[in-house]
Every structure is written in structure tokens, then in C-alpha cells.
Image (tube, rainbow, N blue to C red):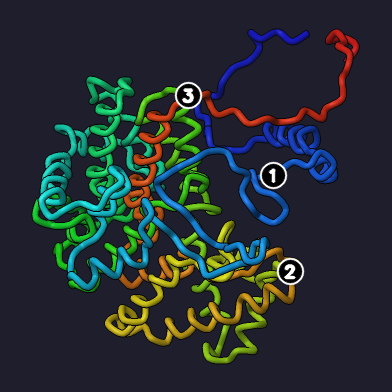
Amino acid sequence: MNNYNDYSIPVKFDYSEITDDIKKLASLCKTNDYINEELYIKYKVNRGLRDLNGKGVLTGLTEISEIKSKEVINGEEVPCEGKLYFRGFDVEELVSGFIKEKRFGFEETVYLLLFGELPSCEQLEEFNKTLVKYRSLPTSFTRDVIMKAPSDDMMNALARSVLTLYSYDKKSNDISIENVLRQCLQLIAMFPILSVYGYNTYNHYYNGKSLIIHPPKPELSTAENILAMLRPDGKYTDIEARILDVALVLHAEHGGGNNSTFTTHVVSSSGTDTYSVVAAALGSLKGPKHGGANIKVVQMFEDMKKNIKDWKDEEEICEYLTALLEKRAFDKAGLIYGMGHAVYSISDPRAKIFASFVEKLSQEKGRTEEYGLYSMVERLAPKVIAEKRKIYKGVSANIDFYSGFVYSMLDLPLELYTPIFAISRIAGWSAHRIEELINAGKIIRPAYMNVAPRREYKNIESR
């Protein structure tokens, strides 16, 4: 038997080092935690809560948003052009409406998602006043929390700030609808500040850049404030602010089944506090299979531009895309990032809306050749995927395909791409948290079948 008194911790110890003992233990995990793929088929397990055709398993009801990718014709489901509805309103019509009226649309989208109706002029004005009132951080929070321990990952910095705000809230554990709504509105208003200040601090301490902190301005929209707070001179063009505003609207909500929103429902169903729920959702959104995907798209295209000599040569582009699928290019993951979606097949309506603005912005920024490459890949990738992969539905560009390119043209740093998503999606998370609490039933607990064999216990000397 071991004597635990023999153990000692080195004076200098690197807690991030993967030591030999950890490697040895990890090999046990890899061996003993592996489950034979055939068992998932045998027991008809819907992995990822989706069937073999990619259709999600029905686990709840919502009135907040709807994703439409199929229609029933003669009793059969047939793929159709993708549609997205917020509270029953077609998102394409919402965007078209505020663009024609030359208004910023994110704030009224937040109102719609939270309260189920489009606001009147008076209601929107009052709602904006409420957001402005909450658009500030607790005294010394920037110095004591954000600047105290800067992180090289903005999503982790954002999650830490959210969890710390719990300590500043006198009613942190109150889950009455009134209090949760107050907390959600504060987080919606604070997220741009937390994200931009977190980046500014990182850029100063890690990259040696000047630390400039601009306070948000009450007369500016959320999109305008993001650009004004981020840029040292606080300047931006009208088209830049309006395209960022559209991006925020398109990312604000996407059904109850996406990973981070489902996380919001799951954690809310336990009865815990708002800050814990939002921190969990942020952890989900950070993943490269979810909110972090647009970063992968940009990185993939950077690699593509280095390896493709003629950006107009279809054959050369197809060869690179084939290399991606065959794990011979970029990160060798076998993926063409930005192509395909868990629900949409023929088209992602968000990508369609975004694409109409991308060309205009690329002209203003002098990046039309790069836009041409994106357009070419959008057209060719589905054909290459169809030839190389067995697919159960169509493949089209998703919102991440263009969003990273737009953010790069807006000169947003790569580190803020996913936090921008969070700044937007906190609106949808808030709406779903409130909906879950109002319709609270049982704690969400799906079943997992145990397939391990029964074994007899042996005392330690005989193992």
C-alpha cells in the first residue's frame, strides 16, 4: 500500500504541463471510455439528439423562433429554401423593413424576442432608455475584474465577468420573472462593454498596445457603440455600423434546439441563477462546432489564398476543396468550414441576407477579388461535397461562411468574432430562459443507456 505522506509538490510547478503520469492515465480513458459504434445503431440511439437524417428529436415547445427547411407535399417532406421566423415574423421581412426605413434593427429585435410583439415608436424609445440605463458596469468593475486577470480568450473572459456579476447582484438567486428579466436586460446592455473592454485589456497586456477605454454613448445603437468603443479614434462609417447591426439581428436567435440555447433550457430547468445559466451558454457557444465556426472559416480562407494561385480557376479551387475533405489541407479535419447546417439544406436564410450586403461592403473596402473567391467557393463546395461524401440532405453556405469575412472587413479582431455572436445571442438566450421558467416543468434529463458489463469487486491486493 502507498503511504500518502510520501507525496510532495515541487516548489515550481507548471500546472498546464501534460506530465507522463497524466499521459498514462489519459490512455486508460481512451481505452476504457470508448463505445463501439455498432452499439449506437443496435440500440437506435439518436446521437446529438438527431436521427440519421439529421432531424432533431422533439424535446420541447417554443414560440420564440422557428426554422423551416422542409415543406410537406403530397404527404412527404421535401427540402425547401430555408426560412427563419422570430415570433412568427419572417426575418427577411424584418431586415428589409428597418433597412428601408433607415433604422438600426437590433434593439427592436431584442424587444420582439423578449416580449413577443414588434414595438411601437413609443415602446421602442422607452425600451432603448432602459438599455441605456443598464449600459454601464459596477463601480471599479473594469479595473478590479476585467483588467485584473486578462485572458487570451475573450469568451472565457466574458464568462468570468458574467459569473463575477453574480456577486454584485443583491437578488442574484431570485428567479421570479420580474427579476430574471431585469438581469437579462442588464446583461444584454453590458455584453458589448464586457467584450470590448476584455479585448482592449488583452491587446494591451498581451500585445503591448495602448490601453484605450471609451465609455458607451447613450445616443448610439448597440452596433455603433461596439465600433466606437473598439476603435482608438471612435470613428466608423454608416455602412459599417448598419452591416454590423444586421449581423447582430441575424445571430440573435435560432430556434430552441441549437447547442447554446438548448444549454440555456437545460440549465434553467434546474432552477439555478441567471448568471450560471448564461455562463454555461457562453461555454457552449465558444466551441468551434457552434459559435467559433466563423473563425475557422476565415482561417481556412487565409490558407486557401496562400495555396491557390488563380482565385478564378474553378479546377484549382475544386482541387483545394477536395484536399480539405480528404484531410490533406488546412487543419486536416476533413471539413469545408461554413458549408452545411444541421437543419438547413437548400439555403440558410441568414447567409442569403448577409450575402446581399457583403458585396457592397467589399466594394467599399477594396476587397472585391476576395469576395469573388468566397462566391466561387460557395458555388463549388456543394458539388465537391456531393461527389465525395454520402449526404442525407443538401449542403449550402451557412451564416458563418460570410460573417467572418464581414468582420474582417470591419477590422474587428479575430478574438472578438465569437463574442460578437454572444452579444447578439444573449437576446435569444434571455427569451428562452424566461420561456423555460414560465412553463417550468420537470428538470431536463435525457436517458443514456449503460452498455458496460457487470463485474465482480476484487480487493486491492488481488487486482
Q: Is residue 248 above or below residue 403?
A: above
Q: Amino acid at mark 1?
A: Arg
Q: Nearer the viewer, residue 60 or 132?
A: 60
Residue 235, given in percent of the width and then of the height, sits at 15, 67
Left or right relative to 246: residue 272: right
Question: Label 1 neighbourhood size at 10 Å, few (<14), some (14-19), many (20+)?
Answer: few
Say if mark 1 contacts mark 3, CB within 8 Å: no
Q: Quadrant of residue 351?
A: bottom left
Q: Is residue 326 above or below residue 319?
A: above
Q: Quadrant of residue 412?
A: bottom left
Q: Quadrant of the N terminus?
A: top right
* Residue at the spot of label 2: 389
Q: Nearer the viewer, residue 21 or 377?
A: 377
Label 3 residue SS: loop
Nearest to viewer (mark 3 / mark 2): 3
Q: Give the spatial CA distance, label 1 vs label 3.
A: 23 Å
Q: Amino acid at mark 3?
A: Ser
* Residue at the spot of label 3: 270
* Residue at the spot of label 1: 47
Sequence-first tag of 3 and 2: 3
Q: Nearer the viewer, residue 40 or 141?
A: 40
Q: Is residue 104 above or below residue 260?
A: below
Query: Residue at (30%, 43%) from the top-left corner?
Result: 114
